[in-house]
Amino acid sequence: MDQAEGLRNIIKQSAIQSRPAARVITVTSGKGGVGKSNVSINLAVQFRRLGKKVIIFDADFGMANIEVMFGAIPKHNLADLIYHGKNIREIITMGPMDIGFISGGSGIASLSNLGKDYIDYLIKNLAELDLLADVIIIDTGAGISDAVLEFLVASGEILLVTTPEPTSITDSYSLLKALNRHPKFDRNNTAIKVVANKVGSFDEGRQLYTKLNAVVNRYLKIPLMLIGVIPEDHELVKAVMQQMPISIQNPNAKAAQAFNDLATALATNATDPVYHKRGMSGFFASMIRGNR
Ligand SMILES: Nc1ncnc2c1ncn2[C@@H]1O[C@H](COP(=O)(O)OP(=O)(O)OP(=O)(O)O)[C@@H](O)[C@H]1O
Ligand SMILES: [Mg+2]
């Protein structure tokens, strides 16, 4: 039995034993600082309100975005699971509203050169994550690094956060262009959903999407949909300063309501990932396997 087959068996077994695998949503952007971590964390809160169990996976290696926004420091990270014998439950930190989060930490960088025993252990543990959560939100780093692209090609569902700033729109395009060139990118099995953030009006959000979609459609032929529009809201900035997601701190604020709409839109727009991308175990199996 080769390694890929071993991984498939582990995933298959967990699929038989359990309920459906968790829905994995990867949040990304071309340009940094456009609102990925806020989208991730507020989406988590709103999914909780819809009765879903949610885990946020902070894959922004080194930046520790989510823990700062939660005001909670995790004791362990993914590297402790891979190398120091911690199990998956030990590396989950519980935040407000019982939202779990996992810090990728330095574990992310070493994913591409793990030995077989480590991989088996990691995938087995991640399969357990599929039992603990309905939705897993992955907050990636910004920009077109190889590490981010690896995450994106393993994803069945991507939220691309873009603001009306011209550089944000062109950077989103550049990211999609790099993704499109990636040998493992599978356009038919990747749903890319645009979240327009920091807009002055709903129309501005639509226009941003229309502009981006026109060039993407013409040059890359990747289908793109608009899934949410979040207004620029000073209340959100205040919430960030207080290390509290705006959806908890001020649920009536315009941005919080828009995050509520985003979660509702996503809940009714579930994408069915192909077998090898299913759940967190499938996600990582497809990521690791492709690197061999
Ligand atoms: N809807 C909004 N209204 C007003 N300000 C916003 C909004 N969204 C984000 N911001 C501002 O942008 C800052 C950066 O947001 P956030 O940390 O979520 O971005 P990011 O894309 O995760 O950044 P990084 O690339 O550094 O990880 C916030 O601290 C806030 O000040
Ligand atoms: Mg961030």
Image: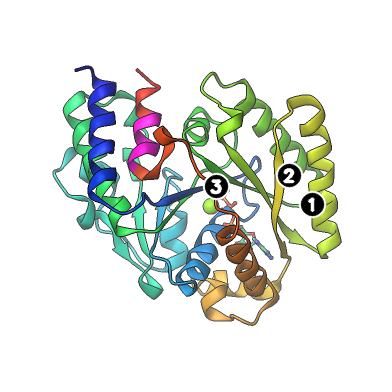
On the image, the x and y values in percent for residue 170 come to: 76, 37
User: Which residue is rendered at x = 51% and y = 35% of the image?
Assistant: 148
Mark positioned earlier in the residue sequence (1 or 3): 1
Question: Which residue range is magenta in the image?
Answer: 281-287
Mark positioned earlier in the residue sequence (3 or 2): 2
Local SS, label 2: helix
Residue wearing tag 3: 271
The answer to whether the residue bearing label 3 lies less than 8 angstroms from the nearest atom of ligand 1 is: no
Which residue type does callout 3 highlight? Answer: Thr
Is the C-beta separation of discs 1 and 2 under 8 Å? yes
Local SS, label 1: loop
Residue wearing tag 2: 168
The answer to whether the residue bearing label 1 lies less than 8 angstroms from the nearest atom of ligand 1 is: no
Q: CA distance from mark 3 to mark 2?
A: 26 Å
Residue wearing tag 1: 164
Viewer-nearest residue: 19 or 219: 19
Q: Nearer the viewer, mark 3 or mark 2?
A: 3
Q: Nearer the viewer, mark 1 or mark 3?
A: 3
Please determine whether, in this image, residue 144 is positioned above or below residue 97: above
Is the C-beta separation of discs 3 and 2 under 8 Å? no
User: Which residue is rendered at x = 54% and y = 18% of the image?
Assistant: 183
Left or right of 157 on screen, residue 133: left
Q: Quadrant of residue 94?
A: bottom left
On the image, the x and y values in percent for residue 167 come to: 77, 42
Please determine whether, in this image, residue 279 is positioned above or below residue 186: below
Which residue type does callout 1 highlight? Answer: Pro
Q: Magenta: predominant secondary structure element?
A: helix
User: Which residue is rendered at x = 42% and y = 43% of the image?
Assistant: 61
